[in-house]
Image: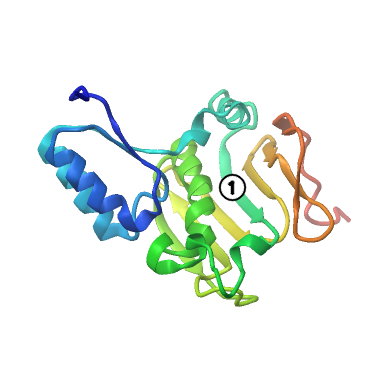
Amino acid sequence: MIPKLMPSISLTPPDSHRDYTLRCAKVGKPVYVEKPMALNFAECQDMIAACRAASVPLWVAFYRRMLPRFRKIKELIDTGAIGAVRVVSVRLYRPADPKQIDPGNLAWRVLPEQSGGGIFMDMGCHSLDFLDYVLAPSVRYTASPPTALAFYPAEDSVSACFEFESGVSGIGQWFFTSFSRIRPHGNRGHARQKSSFRPSTGNSLRSRRPRVCSASTSPPPPMFNSR
């Protein structure tokens, strides 16, 4: 017999997360779901309400908060190594994966009815979660989700501007053609973290050792000629 407190782990596509969560909550099981949490905001609220009513925890797999390079970024911010953060920029560029854009067999990640919004929902949510974690919750977003190459029904690129409760503002670009970078800027310097992947020839990706997060405290160049 399965112990009552053993959590139920949902590693299925997002279109089934709400259903499985409600079923687990009904029988008193803690729930751990993959990200993105669900197809939309309304489904997320249903999941939260069901687990709250059943007094069981609900976790979402935003594990990157605990990865060494992301913890280093948080340390640089928390210790004031880069001063007061004023603006943050995010870029995530990846090449199109041939396995996901076969017209006769499209992957679930690029079908909005299963994924909720394409690869941006699957990967971009990590960037936004991490920023909420280190800079305080975001309060305002303005986004544009254009479709550049139209390999599949979901958007393949997203540009956004956002603001946080802490007063920090940011910009983000998610295009799937290169590498990713998170860079918070303070009044004394900036911190940066590059991804551990880099494009090679064709549409494949080559793994690289992740670069150590670094802080730069060099004074910024003058904006205008002093003459």
Image coords of residue 172 (percent x, y)? 58, 57
Q: Give left or right: position of 14 versus 81.
A: left
Q: Give left or right: position of 227 versus 121.
A: right
Can residue 122 be seen here? The reply is yes
How many dots with numbers?
A: 1
Foreground pick, 113 / 167 = 113
> Which image quarter is the C terminus in?
bottom right
Residue drawn at x 30%, y 58% is 41
Foreground pick, 221 / 76 = 76
Can residue 161 be seen here? The reply is no
Image coords of residue 85 (percent x, y)? 57, 39
Kindly identify which residue carries mark 1: 88
Secondary structure type for disc 1: strand
Above-or-below relation of 73 to 125: above
Residue drawn at x 67%, y 49% is 180
Q: Quadrant of residue 213?
A: top right
Above-or-below relation of 195 to 3: below
Of all residues shown, which one is farthest toward the right?
227
Q: Give left or right: position of 58 versus 149.
A: left
Image coords of residue 134 (percent x, y)? 49, 36
Q: Give left or right: position of 5 versus 141.
A: left
Residue drawn at x 20%, y 52% is 46
> Which image quarter is the N terminus in?
top left
At label 1, the amino acid type is Val
Residue drawn at x 17%, y 39% is 25
Image coords of residue 197 (percent x, y)? 72, 44
Colouring chosen for the image of the structure: rainbow
Of all residues shown, which one is farthest toward the front?
1
